[in-house]
Image (spheres, rainbow, N blue to C red):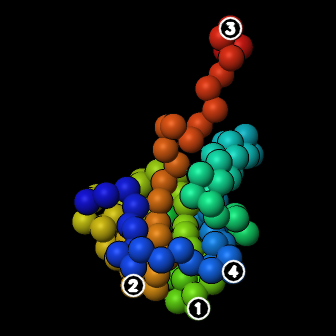
């Protein structure tokens, strides 16, 4: 089990395929949503992706995939070949357990899309004394 999936082709997708979306919990408060989006942008930049959209679902981890309109849109975009990646803040946005995470990773990977999370080394380090 890994945080993300790297297709085994070894090929770099064409520029049009470098698009990514952020998948976030719609129930985040404004401050948390802004911070989550900033983190997703940093992750996209680290991957060489361009964040093109933010897609949300209310309480995604406790809602069945079939009932998550936002997630269905993510899968539609991946199936169309429009996405290189999907970024979420952490695994718990999408999955209750490792098996669920592996399933959504495989679902996107089948379309050549990589699922990844924000990682600690992507986050800015506060200046000493700024906290």
Residue 85 left/right relative to 2: right
Q: CA distance from mark 1 to mark 4?
A: 12 Å
Q: CA distance from mark 1 to mark 2?
A: 12 Å
The residue nearer to you, when weighing 36 against 49, is 49
**Residue matched to label 4:** 16
**Residue matched to label 3:** 129
**Residue matched to label 2:** 110
Circle 1: is it few (<14), some (14-19), or many (20+) Cα within 10 Å?
few
Dot 1 or dot 3, earlier in sequence? 1
Q: CA distance from mark 4 to mark 3?
A: 42 Å
Q: Residue 77, image x and y in percent?
A: 60, 84
Dot 2 or dot 4, earlier in sequence? 4
Q: Residue 89, image x and y in percent?
A: 53, 51
Q: Secondary structure at mark 1?
A: loop
Instruction: Determine the image quadrant of residue 98.
Output: bottom left
Q: Secondary structure at mark 4?
A: helix
């Amino acid at each position: 089990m890994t945080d993300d999936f790297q297709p085994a082709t070894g090929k770099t997708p064409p520029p049009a395929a470098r698009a990514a979306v952020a998948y976030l919990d719609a129930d985040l408060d404004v401050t948390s949503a802004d911070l989550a989006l900033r983190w997703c942008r940093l992750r996209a930049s680290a991957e060489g992706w361009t964040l093109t959209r933010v897609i949300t679902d209310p309480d995604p981890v406790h809602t069945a995939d079939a009932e998550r309109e936002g997630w269905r849109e993510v899968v539609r975009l991946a199936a169309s070949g429009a996405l290189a990646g999907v970024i979420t803040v952490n695994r718990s946005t999408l999955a209750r357990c490792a098996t669920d995470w592996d399933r959504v990773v495989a679902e996107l990977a089948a379309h050549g899309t990589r699922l990844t999370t924000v990682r600690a080394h992507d986050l800015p380090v506060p200046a000493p004394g700024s906290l």
